[in-house]
Image (tube, rainbow, N blue to C red):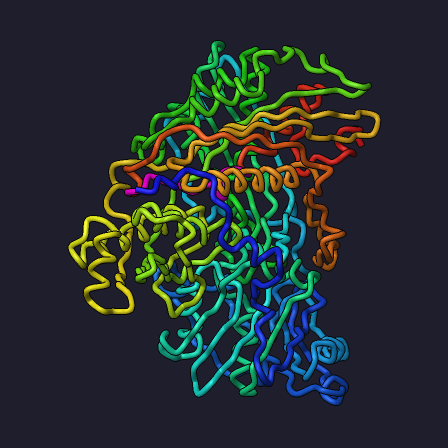
Amino acid sequence: MSNVMGKSVNRQEGRAKVTGSATYAAEHQISGLVYGALITATVAKGRIKTLHLQEAQASPGVLHIATAENIPPLSPVANDWATSQIYESRLPLADQEIHYPGQIIGLVVADTPERARHAATLVQVEYETDTPLINPKSALFITAPRTPGLEQGDTAKSLETAECQISATYTTAMELHAMMEPHAIIAHWQDNNLTVYEPSQWVALHQQTYATLFGIPPEQVRVVTPYIGGAFGAKAFPWPHGILCTAVAREIQRPLKLVLPRQQMTMIVGNRSATEQHLKIGATADGQLLAIEHHAKSQTSPVNPTFAENCIAVTPVMYATPNLSLKQEIAILNVGMPTYMRGPGETPGMFALESAMDELAWTLGIDPVELRLKNATPVHQRSQLPFSAKHFADCLQVGAEQFGWKDRPQQPRSLTRDGKFVGWGMAAATFPGLRFMASATVRLFPDSTVQVLTSANDVGTGAYTVIAISAAETLNLPVENIRVEIGDSRLPNGGLAGGSMMTATLAPAVVNVCEELLKQVNANTTTEALQALQESGQPFLEATGSSQPGTESREWAFQSWGAHFCEVEVDEPLGRVQVKRWVSVMDIGRVINAKAAASQIRGAVIMGIGDALMEECQLDPHLGLPIVYDLATYHIPVHADIPRIQVSFVGEPDRNFNPVGARGCGEIGITGVAAAIANGIYHATGKRLRDLPMTPDQLLGM
C-alpha cells in the first residue's frame, strides 16, 4: 500500500481554479448562444392581472418572452430522494398566482445579456394583491409534518421538581448561502437531446429530474458540472429558474444561458430559515440531567409547505436524560423558499442547546467541559442504538488541554486586555454520519497511470483529491499517477455532494472498484496487473463497480463529534466582539486527506463566526423583499475577522460505518461555533446573548 491516506495532499484541481482554467457553468462556450433575464414579482401575495409586454417585445435584440400564458406544459416530478426532486413543489409559471416576493413570473430572451436585462425592466405588471403574511409573530404554527417530535418520560413533572432548571428562548436570523459562484445554467437542446451546464451537487438526480420534467429518457439528458464555486446545500436539486430556462430553450431551439444576479439570488434560490427555540433543562445539584424540553419553530414558503429547519435533531444524540420532549413547528409565510444550508437544523439547534448547557454549567458552578462529559449519551435516544466509534470525550479533553482551559478565570468580567474584556467559551459539535450509493469506473494504463471516472462532483470539499488518494492507496501508486474525471452524468452515478456524505460514499466505492480491477486479471498487486495488461495487448484494463450502505444502520447509530474552544475580546463601549483564538478538535473517523479535512473545518468555523456575529437577511415588513442585495450588504467574515484556527483530529476509523472507516467533515465544523462565541461573550462581560447574530446593539443594551 502507498500509505497516502491520512497524509496532507495538495488538491488536484487547485491550480486550475487559481489560474482560471477551471470552467464553471456560465463559462462554457456554445455557438449560437442567447441570453435570458428573469421577470420577478414585486408583490408578496396576489395574482397577475395583466402583463404589459409590448415595450419589452419591441426592445432591440429581444427574441422571446415566456409567461404563464405561453409556457409549454411540464410533467410533474415524484419529488422524492429515490427518483427526482425539485426545491419548489410548484413548477415555474404554473399559474398567475403570486406566493412570495421575487417569484419568477416571466423570462426574457435576447441576443445579449444586457439587452435581456434591459427588456425585463420594461415589463409592466398589474396585480390583484392580497395581504401577505411576512411576520412570523402573526403566523399560525403547526407541527412540522415531516419532522417527528419525541415524548419520552414525564418531562414537565421532572422539570418542575428538578433541583436546578434553565429556561430560555434563543433565536437565529434568516441566512443566505452567499456562495462565490452565482446560480447559472446553459440549456442546449439538439434533436430532443438535452445538455445542461449547471452547478449540481447531485448530477445523477439532476439528470433524472430533467428527464421526468421534459418526458424524455434519462440517457437523452446530459448534465455537466466539473466545478462548483460553492453551494452549501443550495445546488442539490433544480430550482425554478433552471427548469424555466430549459423549457424556453426547447421552445425556441436555441442554447440559452441564464445567470442570476445577486439580488435575485437573495429571493429565489433558498435560505436558512429564521428560528425560535425554547429550551428547558432540569438537573440535579451535581449536574446530572433529568429532563430536556426543546421546542423549535421555523418558517417555510407556500411553494414548499412542509420544509422545516430541523433544530431538534441534535438533542437526542448529545446528552442522556430519562425525560425528553421534542417538538418542531413551522409557519407558512409569503417568503422565498428556505432550504438546506451547511449543517441544516444542527447549526441553529446546537446554538440553542450548547448555549443552554453553558447557562446550566454557570448556574450549577460546574465546569462546562465536565458537565458535558458527565452527561454524554452512549446511545441515540430516538433509536436507542449505540453509537459507533464515538470519541466525544477525547474531543473535549484534547481540546481543553490544547486551549489551556484549566487556566480559565472562574468569574465573568475577570479578564481584561488593553482595556477590553476577554472571555473564553466552548461548545460541542456534532453531525450525523451519512452515506449513500456511488459507482465509479477505473482504468489502468500501461504507463502506470490510472483514470477514475464518476459523476460525483466537488463543491469545494476536495473530492477530486479524495478519489485520487483512494485509488492510489489501493493500487499502491503515487497519487500523482491518478487522473480524476467527475461531474458528468455520462459517467457512473457518483451520488450526492451534500449531507457531508461525499467522502464517506466515494472512497469505499473507488477502493472497491480498484480491488475489482486487480481481481479481473487475478492480480495481487498493480505490478502483476500491469504485466497482464502488457500480455493482453489491450490499451487499458477497466473495471466498474459501486459501494452502498448495508444493514449496519440497524445495529449502530453513526455520528461525528467535536469540540470548539475560543477566546473573544469585547470592546464594551463600542459593543464590538472580536474572535482572537480558536481550537477545534474533531472525531470524524478515518481522515482521508489531513490538509483538506482541516481546511474544511476551518472554513466551517469561519462560516460559523459569520453566523454568530454578522450574517442576517432582513425582510421589508410590508413587501417581504430582502433588504440585502449583494455581497456588500449581506455581511460575511473577512480576513480581519478571523484568527488562526487550530484543528486536530482524534478517534479511530469507523469501520462499522464503511470499509474505509471515514465519516464526512464538511458540516460538523459549523455546529456549535455560535454557541462557543456566545459563551465566550458571557464569560467576558456577564451578558448572556441569545439572539443571532450577536450585534453591537445587543451588547450596548439597545
Does residue 296 belong to the magenta stretch? no
Spot the residue most to the left.
522
Q: Picture coordinates of residue 299 (x, y %)?
A: 57, 50
Residue 515 visible, this orientation: yes
- Judging depth in this view, the residue of 494 and 671 nearest the camera is 494
Instruction: Identify the residue at image location x=27%, y=51%.
Output: 512
- Quadrant of res 556: top left
Which secondary structure is most common in the magenta stretch?
loop
Q: Is residue 117 left or right of residue 657?
A: right
Instruction: Identify the residue at image location x=38%, y=41%.
Output: 5
The N terminus sits in image quarter:
top left
The C terminus sits in image quarter:
top right
Q: Picture coordinates of residue 329 (x, y %)?
A: 51, 44
Instruction: Please report the bounds of the magenta region as a residue range.
Output: 659-670
Q: Is residue 318 left or right of residue 647?
A: left
Residue 208 against residue 281 in the figure, above or below:
below
Residue 361 against residue 628 in the figure, above or below:
above
Q: Is residue 547 left or right of residue 23?
A: left
- Judging depth in this view, the residue of 408 and 299 nearest the camera is 408
Q: Picture coordinates of residue 555 (x, y %)?
A: 25, 37
Instruction: Identify the residue at image location x=71%, y=20%.
Output: 422
Instruction: Identify the residue at image location x=66%, y=80%.
Output: 108
Q: Is residue 134 left or right of residue 9?
A: right
- Judging depth in this view, the residue of 499 and 463 nearest the camera is 463
Residue 441 visible, this orientation: no
Residue 273 against residue 79 in the figure, above or below:
above
Does residue 668 belong to the magenta stretch? yes
Spot the residue most to the right.
573
